[in-house]
Structures are given as C-alpha cells and as structure tokens.
Image (spheres, rainbow, N blue to C red):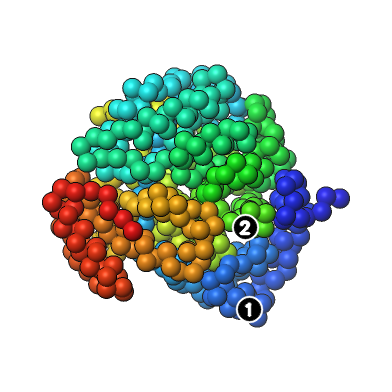
Amino acid sequence: MIKYNPKSLIADEFINDEEILLTLEYADKNKNDLELIDKILEKAKQNKGLNHREASVLLACEDKDKINEIYNLAHKIKNDFYGNRIVMFAPLYLSNYCVNGCLYCPYHIKNNNIPRKKLSQEEIKKEVIALQNMGHKRIAIEAGEDPINNPIDYIIDSIKTIYSIKHKNGAIRRVNVNIAATTVDNYKKLKEAGIGTYILFQETYHKKSYEYLHPTGPKHNYAYHTEAMDRAMDAGIDDVGIGVLFGLDKYRYEFAGLLMHAEHLEAVHGVGPHTISIPRVKRASDIDPTKFDNSLSDEMFYKLTACIRIAVPYTGMIISTRETPKVREKIIHLGVSQISGGSRTSVGGYSEKERPHDTEQFDVSDNRTLDEVVNWLICNGYIPSFCTACYREGRTGDRFMELCKSGQIQNCCHPNALMTLKEFLVDYASPDTRRIGENLIAKEINNIKTQNIQDFVKKQLIQIENGKRDFYL
C-alpha cells in the first residue's frame, strides 16, 4: 500500500488515492456534525488556512446556515488578503499544434475539424499591439504540446518578442506561461526569460481517470505531469499556478487533491501555489461537455470556490471567461482575485476585427470588451488592477507569501492598483468608464492609511494625467 507523504517528491505519495478516499469518508461522516464544523470555521477565522480533511468537511456540509457562514467567511478572508482589488489579465494563444490525445481538449491530435495554426514572431507582435490597445499589461501565453512546432526555443523567443513591444503607452509588463510539463533545464530557460507565474493545470488528480483522459502523447505520464511544479521550483521559478478542470472527475475528489497539492508545495518548498485556477469543462470544437458525467452545478461551484478561499487564503484565485458574467460576479464575491477580460481563445484572435471561432480552445461565455468588464467591476465596488509591481520588484515566491500572509502586501497593492487603473482610464477607457473610475480612485485614495504613501499616489496620479507612466511601489 502506497503511504501518504506530503513531503515526498513522488506523485502517488503526495497526491495519495487512499488518503483522498479516507478524506471523503471522513467528510461524509462529519458533514452534519455542527460542533466540529464550528471548530473548523473558528480555525479558519485565524486566516491561516485549513488542511484538506477540514476543508472537505465544509464542502460536504449540508446545513444552510453553515453554508452561509462559509460564504461570509470566504468573502471576509478574500478582503483581508486582497481587499477589493481584482487583477486583470488576458490569455494569448500562440499555437494549437499538439501531439497529445486529450479527450476534453479540441487541440487533440486526432481533431481534423480545426485548422492548425502557429503564430510567427511578426504575428505575435500584432497580437500584442492589439492587447496593448485594449489596455492589458499582463498576459498568459498558451500553446499546445508539440516538440517540433512549439519547442522551448519558440516559447522563449515569443516571450522576448512580447516584452520588446512598446506601442503608444502600451506595454506588457508580466508574461505568465501555461505550457506542458517539461524538464528542469527548460524551466531554467523560462526563468531566465523573465516569466511571471508558471501555470499548469492538473486537469484531474484521479490517476485512472487521468490516464483514460490522456490516452496518447507525453501528457499520458501522470507522474511526470503531477511532479512538474517541483521541477519548476527546483529550477528557480518562484511563482507557480495550479488548477483542476472541474467536470472531468468527481469534484470532491479533485478538491481534496488540489488542496493536497498546495500542502505538498508548502511542505517541500516553503511556498504554496501563487494561483489556483478553477475552470469548468466547456463546449468546443469536437468536444461535448455532456459526455463527462461529473458536471458541477453553479451552486456547488460557488461553494467549492468559497471552500478553496478559506483553505488556501493567501493564494490568488483565477476565473476565466469560460464562465458567464452572472457566475463570475458571484465567484468574485466568494474569493476570486484575478479574472480575464476581453479574452479571445483562438490563435491570432486579437488582431482580427471579428472574433474568430475556428481555433478556439473553448467557448467564451463572457464576450464583453475589457472596457465593459472594467466598468462592471467598478460599478460593483471593485478596483480593476493592472499592477505587475511585485514581480518586477522581486516580491515573488516566499517573499510575496511573507508579505501576503502578514497583510503587508496591501500597503503596496492598493496604491499600485489605483495608479494602474488611472493609466487605463486615461489611455483606453470609454467616457463613462473614465468618469466612474475617477470617482472610485478619489474615494479609494482615502483608504490608503499611510499619509506619505497617500501623498505619493496623489502626486503620481497627476503625473499620469500629464502623460507619464509606470509608477509603482
């Protein structure tokens, strides 16, 4: 019998099937034990997180009053760590060439219904300019796994191209990377190229399901994929982002596995995941989500989000345009701190006037422009943030986590959010968005508690109005 060991570097030991099954059994046994649930919630109120067993009890809880307490606590914890800021980003698809046979992804090698496309460096420039013209400062590059068409050198060259482009007042200041599991040497190359967060979704932590859903290609190797974050961190990448594609397997199993992965990274590297993404399976070319019988209702999705926020309070939580505006509004309230806006999930989609659908990785459910998303966030009391200062100031990995867990990060993030929002309002916003955005900034300046920082921000806001850019703490 394989034993559970969060400090192990072996996938089957730190994501241990027996431990997950015992966790689910424990949660079922205690889901109506209100005394235990109260103890777990009291522990969670200390803002130090929960382990996978404690969090699984909350997820299984059926008491409506306790569920409301879970929601309220998740909202409070999110505000304690991240305030009312929402970080904005966009995905940039470089290539849909892929050698894997993943059953849930339209890029799988047997799909002949989509044209295969790979952006040249000149085409990448056009995409980046289009993103800059929208107002984006942070992107996540995406590419299928194909050692011939998408080798690591192509990814590195693309990152260099992205960082090199300065169009009008536009600049991409942080490039996150979402590519297939690779070697320590290749992760070192990504680190040297100046990436922000390395992102890799597990898809599913259930090993048998994983191997079934990845029948062919290098991604079939469960251990190599699951152990990728350890190689990335050994290579010097400070910030890593994990995630599950909910709907592929039972959500409670995935929830426990996701938290165990976070616990493993903390136990081995002293730093948990910088981000956790929570996508759900969506329709796409050659992909019918109804084929997967583990779909997650909106209500359970909300509960799951709240429980992740409570269990891993320090992590940035990400929701994409896979979800509708209605779902995104609820999810943000319950803990999400980063969202995409104005996204196009096709290769070369941003430089096209009309949204192309032939190479989309998934159907987009929120088709609003970035300006419309920013306007919506402001109207709901949030500060859309285009800040990338922590990455550029070296506040990554354990340095970021130390500041985040102590609450000190807000001394930087809140002022930086206001200054980057000001840039967006001056350079890209519609008149209505600028009007309400300026009102929000005027109000939020008063929430900066340190007078010298407040004075600094006021001074830089004037500088931004006069044409200068890129101020941060």
**Disc 1 residue type (three-letter):** Lys
> Where residue 111 appears, x then y in whole percent?
53, 22
Q: Residues within 10 Å of mark 1 (few under 14, many from 20)?
A: few
Q: Secondary structure at mark 1?
A: helix
* Residue occupying the point 73% across, 66% down: 26
Q: Is residue 253 left or right of residue 158?
A: right
Circle 2: element type: loop
State the residue position of label 2.
270
Label 2 or label 1, whichever comes before in sequence order: 1
Which residue, given by chain and number where applicable, does mark 1 sit on? 39
Residue located 31% across and 74% down the image: 449
Task: Find residue 109 and report its horizontal and vertical position in percent.
Answer: 57, 22
Q: Which residue does the image show at 62% across and 57% down from the upper left?
A: 270
Residue 304 marker:
none
Crowding at mark 2 (Cα within 10 Å: few <14, some 14-19, many 20+): few
Q: Amino acid at mark 2?
A: Gly
Farthest residue, direction bottom: 35
Residue 427 visible? The answer is: yes
Using the numbered discs, state the Cα–Cα distance from disc 2 to disc 1 in whole angstroms. Answer: 26 Å
Mark 2 vs mark 1: in front:
2
Q: Nearer the viewer, residue 432 or 62?
A: 432
Which quarter of the rendering shows the C terminus?
bottom left
Q: Is residue 338 visible?
A: no
Q: Nearer the viewer, residue 289 or 47?
A: 47
Q: Viewed as shown, does residue 134 lie left or right of 209?
A: left
Name the residue rendered at 48%, 29% in the picture: 155
Residue 317 vertical position relative to residue 192 in the rendered view, above or below? below
| 362 over 238 or under it: above or below | above
